[in-house]
Amino acid sequence: MRPGPPFGEEAHVVAPCCCCGKVAQLQTLWTKSNPMTRFHACPKSGGRNNGCRFFCWVDDEMPPHEKGVMAWLLRRMRQLEQDIERMRAREKKLWVALFILWVVVVFV
Ligand SMILES: [Zn+2]
């Protein structure tokens, strides 16, 4: 992999200008086959008829081992985010139960 700026320092990446005159936008892929891979695309891309097709990679392709590690990290991150959501829902239920218990103790 080419030595580039660490992730998050996108300001150092010079955005190329597209043939249609727009400054290409820096975007990051988070797919399993291309995790954390940055590319430039024209802001007019994606349109059906007049869509511009300008596209170029910023990062070289990751070695297979790094791709595997990245995919595992992404999967683990999603699992942890789901765990947090479940814990928050449980905390909410416990607060409601605590409130009901308090009402029962105070008023009954
Ligand atoms: Zn363009």
Image (spheres, helix red, strand yellow):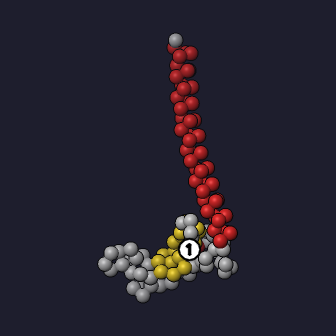
Q: Secondary structure under badge 1? A: strand
Along the line of sight, which residue is nearer the eye, 91 or 33? 33
Q: Is residue 16 above or below residue 33?
A: below
- In the displayed structure, 68 sits above or below 76; it is below
Q: Which amino acid does label 1 sit on?
A: Arg
Which residue has dot 1 on it?
Answer: 38
In which image quadrant can residue 83 be found? top right
Q: Quadrant of the N terminus?
A: bottom right
Residue visible at 64% across and 59% down?
Answer: 73
In front: 3, or 9? Answer: 3
Quadrant hosting residue 10: bottom right
- Report whether residue 63 is seen: yes
Query: Which residue corresponds to the image point at 57% horizontal and 30% vertical from the top-left?
Result: 94
Query: Badge 1: how crowded within 10 Å, few (<14), some, or many (20+)?
Result: many
Query: Does the numbered disc 1 mark a residue whose Cβ is under 8 Å from ligand 1?
Result: no
**What's the residue at 53%, 38% (across, down)?**
89
Residue 24 in view (yes/no)? no
Which x, y percent locates residue 28?
54, 70
Rendered location of residue 63, percent (x, y):
66, 74
Question: As displayed, is residue 26 above or below residue 76?
Answer: below
Q: Which residue lies furthest to the top in this view?
A: 108
Q: Is residue 97 left or right of residue 66?
A: left
Residue at position x 56%, y 36% in the image:
90
Q: Is residue 7 left or right of residue 19?
A: right
Residue 23 location (% of width, % of height): 46, 80
